[in-house]
Amino acid sequence: MAAIGAPVENRTSTNHDNKNYTFPLIVITTLFFMWGFITCLNDILIPKFKGHFDLLGWQAMLVQSAFFSAFFLVSLLYFIVSALGFDLISKIGYKNAIIVGLGVSGIGCLLFIPAADNESFNSFLGALFVLASGITILQMGANPYVALLGAPQGSSARLNMTQAFNSLGTTVAPVIGGMLIFKASSSAVEKSLESVKHPYIGLAVALFVLAAIIAVVPLPKLSGNDGEAEQKGIGAYKYLHLLLGVGCIFFYVGGEVSIGSAIINYLELEKIAGLTPEKADKYLSFYWGGAMIGRFFGAIFLNETTDIKKHGVMLAGIMLLSYILGTFLMNKDILLHGENMPMDFTTPIYFTGITLLNLAAFYYGKNKPGFTLGLFAGIVCFLLAVTMFASGSIAMWAVLSIGLFNSIMSPTIFTLAIKDLGVDTGQGASLLVMAIVGGAIIPPLQGLLYGEANSGLQTSFIVPLICYVYIMYYGFVGSKPKRLS
């Protein structure tokens, strides 16, 4: 899933534009990778739990509801406290907020141990809620921190680049998670959830180690309210483009998560691909990997100061990356395990071709964030229509291609929504983070349409289609800054 945060361009700490923040950015970028990896593992848990606990489609989607409802509840609490004039993150600093978030997430990972031992689906949902609560704190701490680590005019570019590594986490998660959770499963029913427990123990260790590293390394102690008095009240509601942007984040996160959650079961359908879950998980990586490729493009094309002609080598490198990524994803069993099978080079070529289409759409967008957002949403609407009514490889690649066009939506929506908010930027950001609850509500709505034996799964994509129609409206119309009073 895409990381959400506020590039707080109107808030600066001391003059640090000439300082070298390369090392702090590397450390923080690791966080983006980690929470992308963790979030995408939900897409592996859904079919795993659906089969093990014999769940209906909407019940399995409660994995996403438990995870993303934490974003809403924690952000709502933070919003209420900030409206009363007490901004906790500004008090303790972004660095300490990040450490707290990592610790809470690590505890959530450890809660997978009793959940697996007790074979309790509800306990897993509770563990996911705690895990996501920690990630919510990370979202509110790390994104503004990235924006402040350097010159204000470069904040959007830095956020796009770090979010590309968030997408790298979502790309490798299906590969690694699929191997650990599906292939490591024991045939004995009582042992089958061991394969779920062990990866999260490893994640807990990694999160605690990362928290310790951040605690001891000399990172700048920045906060978001330097030079400004804390504001009481709810001033953010004065901006129409922000309020419409909250709805846009809601529908974007809901649509993106809903599609990603349904892909494995979709590719199992005989009329689409007839794949097993173990084989379908490698294709899921194309969906999330596309978001990574697109964000690297976005870091170039959505920067108003970028001379695109001077970035030919970088663009060529990204195209090469897309082919290398596709080659690995399609041949990982051969490359990792030395299996005696012919290499698949056709699929990577197809994926690279879709990447060229994405590149062409960026050129057509011409550095206009709102227009590019509307254009990309329109393309996704078309791809979802193909997903619903086509069959075979056409339908399969239509749904997998959506990730490429999802790529820049999260940072673009956020940047458009907080434009010209002034001192209300922080409060507006908390509203936008709250809207991530769309990832908790939209997937179960799509799951309700699955029907018996996933018979209605293809039709169920009407739910995310509605989401992207709204995003298209916001990009073309609703994103224009407008103050209500």
Image (cartoon, grey):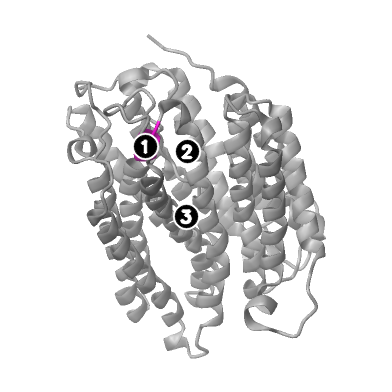
Side (left or right) of 323 relative to 479: right
Mark 3 secondary-structure assignment: helix
Q: Amino acid at mark 2?
A: Arg
Residue displayed at 37% across by 41% down: 21
Residue 438 appears in the rendering: yes
Instruction: Specify which label sits upstream in the sequence, 2 or 3.
Output: 3
- The residue singled out by tag 3 in the image is 36
Query: Whole-percent x and y of residue 423?
Result: 30, 20
**Displayed quadrant of residue 300:** top right
Q: Amino acid at mark 3?
A: Gly
Instruction: Specify which label sits upstream in the sequence, 2 or 1.
Output: 1
Mark 1 secondary-structure assignment: loop
Q: Nearer the viewer, residue 95 or 433?
A: 95
Residue 247 appears in the rendering: no
**Displayed quadrant of residue 344:** bottom right
Query: Whole-percent x and y of residue 30?
Result: 42, 55
- Above or below for 54 versus 397: below
Q: Amino acid at mark 1?
A: Leu
Q: Which residues are magenta?
A: 145-150
At label 3, counting other C-alpha atoms closer than 10 Å, the crowd grade (few under 14, some 14-19, many 20 or more) is many
Instruction: Specify which label sits upstream in the sequence, 1 or 3.
Output: 3
- Above or below for 189 versus 133: below
**Displayed quadrant of residue 470:** top right
Query: Whole-percent x and y of residue 176?
Result: 53, 70
- The residue singled out by tag 1 in the image is 149
Mark 2 secondary-structure assignment: helix
Query: Whole-percent x and y of residue 405?
Result: 65, 42
Residue displayed at 70% across by 45% down: 384
Q: Are marks 1 and 3 in contact (CB under 8 Å)?
A: no
- Distance, label 2 to label 3, CA atoms, is 17 Å
- The residue singled out by tag 2 in the image is 158
